């Protein structure tokens, strides 16, 4: 899939250069990408979205989706034209209540020409009416829409939105959402945030979901199907909403024994990472055949396969850690993926430490010795893995060793202050790997550029495993016992986002 997406980027770049002279920014036209180094045509330039209002109708029987997206945004430059990213069929576009002309270009670009050009800083309301069958729409051979026997699911990274709503599809432009979905009675529509209302009329039920905090497009999810809904409230008053497909079969018990611990795990995470940034939690397990999970905001997506060998709280720990590392503090560009995956993997090591199933230091030492020096694993640089290796095991495992190295260097007290301080300092924002390095240096008063260059930016296995702060030296490699949590974490890790 990474390879297919790379092909997308190349094709789109070629398309971009037929309409734009190479290197030129044409005044008045928004760019067909935000300038992501890995995915040049993802997102768009020239405006900033504040809110998406999606009013949809979905028919599970034939996977037909239709609806209206109302997008409120602000032009960040004068615009005679701008782009959205979208793959379904568009029937009508209005810009500030006037009919706009539109055309397709590139792999997933919708070029919109408003009746009147937009001025810089002008508020703009965009209405897009559309319809389609998401499971039948591929972009360069790829389709992340998950069709289930009783509905469909949108959960993918970095691509998912094109198959169900038009957007500025890049994590650097976060927005709030109202997602309203009409489905046949007896079927549920699950999305992010809080359920504002659900009302039935003439055989159809409308579910109104609200995400009141900034949310990236790829973290916005939709699942339609027949679910068992479990609601609760955490001790601190946070609503818990989880959903399990009624069709999970033998995986049902283990799924509930894992996702059912969401609130308990969250309470522990608040102690380690600081206040929870959102207004709901939970998770959903649809009857999909995939093997990955995704940190969809406030409501992570889990594949039943995670639970085939029994309960696995580690995958819940991982996806919930992303609520701080990925969802609250999001990547500036996709090159910064270590800020998501290195931290989410390290949170599993901390859970293991708490549960007495192996300390983070032991997991780091074991991981270091697990991959021989000549293993291609060590050729992937977590700080800049490349689009093809964005979700490579090295981003997770070597990425987590990097954090253990930091812990060893600055000591536990400073390290845990950094873990809590980073989300607080970047609340609802975006950050680069370099921003974290600078933050850790400020907090510790130490120069850390060598440490991060070694663990994040240099191909090849570093000369030695990180030394624990409270140990005189690293355990000799080769004599390290496999930590009890190792297999459970790898079971999760091999399939995290792992369509990729
Ligand atoms: Zn992850």
Image: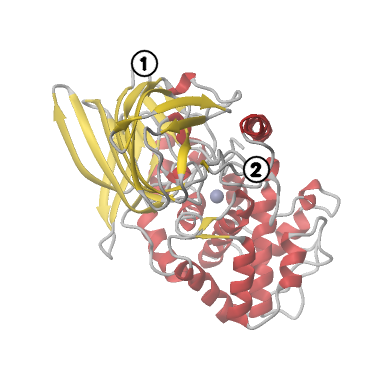
Residue 293 x %, y %: 50, 42
Residue 68 x %, y %: 31, 30
Query: Could you say which quadrant of the image residue 407 lies in?
Result: bottom right
Marks 1/2: CA–CA distance: 44 Å
Give the left or right position of residue 294, taking residue 276 as reference: right
Q: Tell which of 492 and 118 is nearer to you.
A: 118
Give the left or right position of residue 456, taking residue 53 as reference: right
Residue that mark 1 sits on: 62
Can residue 265 be seen here? The reply is: yes
Q: Tell which of 39 and 244 is nearer to you.
A: 39
**Residue under the image location 49 percent in, 60 percent down:** 329
Residue that mark 2 sits on: 24
Query: Could you say which quadrant of the image residue 270 lies in?
Result: bottom left
**Residue under the image location 67 percent in, 80 percent down:** 470
Query: Which residue is outermost to the top?
Result: 62
**Residue under the image location 58 percent in, 28 percent down:** 106
Residue 135 x %, y %: 46, 22
Query: Could you say which quadrant of the image residue 264 lies in?
Result: bottom left
Can residue 287 be seen here? The reply is: no
Q: Secondary structure at mark 2?
A: loop
Q: Few, some or many C-alpha atoms within 10 Å of disc 1 (few <14, some 14-19, many ≥20)?
A: few
Give the left or right position of residue 256, taking residue 326 as reference: left
Q: Tell which of 476 and 380 is nearer to you.
A: 380
In the picture, the quarter occupied by the C terminus is top right
């Amino acid at each position: 899939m990474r390879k297919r997406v790379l092909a997308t980027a190349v094709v789109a770049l070629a398309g971009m250069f037929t309409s734009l002279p190479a290197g030129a920014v044409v005044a008045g036209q928004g760019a067909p990408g935000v300038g992501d180094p890995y995915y040049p045509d993802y997102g768009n330039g020239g405006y900033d979205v504040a809110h998406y209002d999606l009013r949809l109708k979905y028919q599970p029987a034939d996977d037909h989706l239709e609806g209206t997206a109302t997008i409120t945004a602000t032009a960040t430059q004068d615009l005679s034209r701008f782009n959205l990213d979208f793959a379904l069929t568009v029937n009508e576009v209005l810009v500030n209540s006037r009919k706009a002309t539109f055309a397709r270009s590139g792999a997933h670009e919708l070029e919109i020409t408003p009746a009147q050009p937009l001025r810089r800083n002008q508020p703009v309301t965009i209405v897009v009416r559309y319809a389609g069958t998401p499971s039948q729409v591929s972009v360069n051979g790829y389709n992340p829409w998950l069709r289930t026997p009783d509905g469909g699911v949108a959960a993918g990274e970095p691509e998912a939105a094109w198959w169900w709503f038009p957007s500025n599809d890049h994590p650097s432009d976060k927005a709030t959402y109202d997602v309203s979905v009409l489905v046949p009675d007896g079927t549920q529509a699950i999305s992010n945030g809080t359920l504002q209302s659900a009302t039935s009329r003439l055989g159809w039920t409308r579910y109104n979901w609200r995400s009141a905090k900034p949310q990236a497009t790829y973290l916005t999810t939709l699942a339609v199907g027949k679910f068992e809904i479990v609601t609760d409230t955490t001790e601190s008053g946070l609503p818990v909403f989880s959903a399990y497909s009624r069709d999970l079969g033998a995986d049902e018990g283990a799924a509930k024994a894992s996702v059912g611990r969401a609130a308990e795990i969250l309470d522990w995470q608040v102690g380690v990472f600081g206040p929870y940034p959102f207004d709901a939690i939970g998770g959903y397990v649809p009857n999909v055949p995939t093997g990955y999970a995704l940190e969809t905001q406030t409501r992570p997506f889990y594949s039943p396969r995670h639970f085939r060998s029994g309960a696995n709280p580690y995958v819940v720990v991982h996806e919930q850690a992303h609520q701080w590392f990925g969802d609250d503090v999001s990547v500036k560009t996709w090159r910064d993926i270590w800020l998501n995956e290195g931290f989410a993997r390290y949170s599993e090591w901390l859970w293991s430490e708490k549960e007495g199933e192996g300390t983070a230091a032991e997991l780091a030492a074991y991981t270091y010795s697990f991959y021989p020096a000549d293993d291609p694993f060590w050729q992937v640089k977590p700080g800049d893995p490349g689009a093809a290796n964005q979700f490579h095991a090295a981003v997770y495992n070597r990425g987590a060793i990097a954090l253990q190295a930091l812990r060893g260097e600055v000591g536990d007290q400073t390290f845990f202050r950094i873990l809590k301080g980073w989300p607080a300092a970047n609340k609802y924002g975006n950050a680069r790997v370099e921003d974290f390095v600078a933050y850790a240096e400020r907090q510790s008063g130490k120069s850390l550029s060598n440490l991060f260059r070694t663990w994040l930016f240099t191909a090849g296995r570093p000369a030695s495993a990180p030394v624990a702060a409270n140990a005189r030296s690293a355990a000799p490699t080769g004599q390290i016992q496999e930590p009890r949590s190792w297999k459970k974490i790898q079971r999760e890790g091999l399939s995290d986002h792992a369509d990729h």
